[in-house]
Image (tube, rainbow, N blue to C red):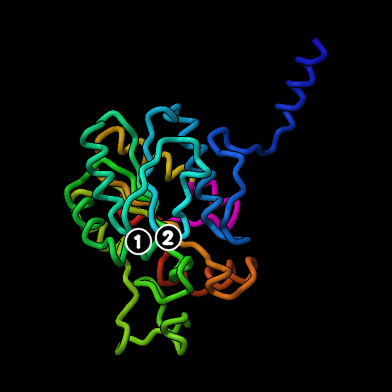
Amino acid sequence: METLELDIVKQENLIYEKPRLMNDNPMHYCPGCSHGVVHKLIAEVIDEMGMEEKTIGIAPVGCAVFAYNYLDIDWIEAAHGRAPAVATAVKRLNPNKMVFTYQGDGDLAAIGTAETIHACNRGENIVIVFINNAIYGMTGGQMAPTTLLDMQTSTCPYGRKVELNGYPLKISDLLALLDGTCLVTRQAVHTATAVRRAKRTLRKAFENSMARKGTSVVEFVSNCPSGWKLTPEQANQWMIKNMFPKYPLGDLKDI
């Protein structure tokens, strides 16, 4: 009886615990990076849906290349940018599986632009999780398709210029125009409120895929403290001031 009472008290006072589907492996992400939070939200949603045995994640090339080390589900590693193509095959061959890709802006909006657009245009019943931190974080801080105007990177040290580099690519806006997408949304995880909203949106996206409504795209406007050469706190403030005006949070499409 005493053990049971202690368990009840412990449960009543529980504020947060590690998601059940998260492994014990230490994460390789930099302090303040958004990837770890998004990983945890995905793990929580899959667990709460009871889909851990039916979920297949497609891991990217980029900072999240080792995503399979952290979430205890089935994973397939895709070539750079090809995650939506791999996810298409997996979902079509296994229609009862819950299939999602996890991609950064370089993976999704540069080398993988064609795969992303055509998977969304076909309305593949998958979820695309898109981390947009406006930089190539893994390979040295180069300019990405989503890099902001005048933003300095290792390949545009004086800032991105329209006449040389073109405009930042708002890829989610393009995807929202396609008939095959049922949900296209921008979220963030920089505050507790934002985290809760993001979790609800991920749940909706995964439910959409199982209901065969088409492709759901969940973009996370994220920071990159190391790539931006800022502290985690400074990076969040810079993101709010500079990223959010160009990539405003909220639903772009929700059918």
Which x, y percent locates residue 3? 79, 15
Any magenta on residue 158?
no
Residue sitting at 53 percent across and 72 percent down?
227
Q: Secondary structure at mark 1?
A: helix
- Residue 62 got which mark? 2
Location of the C terminus (image quadrant): top left
Task: Please tell me which residue is depicted at 74% across the width and 32% down the height of the picture.
Answer: 13
Asked whether 195 falls inside the magenta stretch, the response is yes
**139 lies above or below 96:** below
235 or 66: nearer the viewer: 66
The image's mark for residue 13 is: none
Q: Quadrant of the N terminus?
A: top right
Residue placed furthest toward the top: 1
Disc 2 residue type?
A: Gly
Q: Is residue 154 above or below residue 3?
A: below
Q: What is the span of residues highlighted in magenta in the rendered image?
A: 186-198
Marks 1 and 2: CB-CB under 8 Å? yes
Residue at 45%, 55% (x, y): give it.
187
Q: Left of 79 or right of it: where is 150?
A: right
Q: Is residue 12 above or below residue 39?
A: above
Q: Quadrant of residue 8?
A: top right
Q: Secondary structure at mark 2?
A: loop
What's under tag 1, amino acid-wise? Asp
Q: How far across and how far down the image is residue 77, in percent?
A: 36, 47
Counting from the top left corner in percent of width and height, residue 38 is at 50, 50
Residue lying furthest right: 2
Residue 189, position as x, y percentages in the image: 53, 55
Q: Which residue is mark 1?
A: 107
Kindly identify the residue that appears in the image at 32 percent across and 79 percent down.
Answer: 167
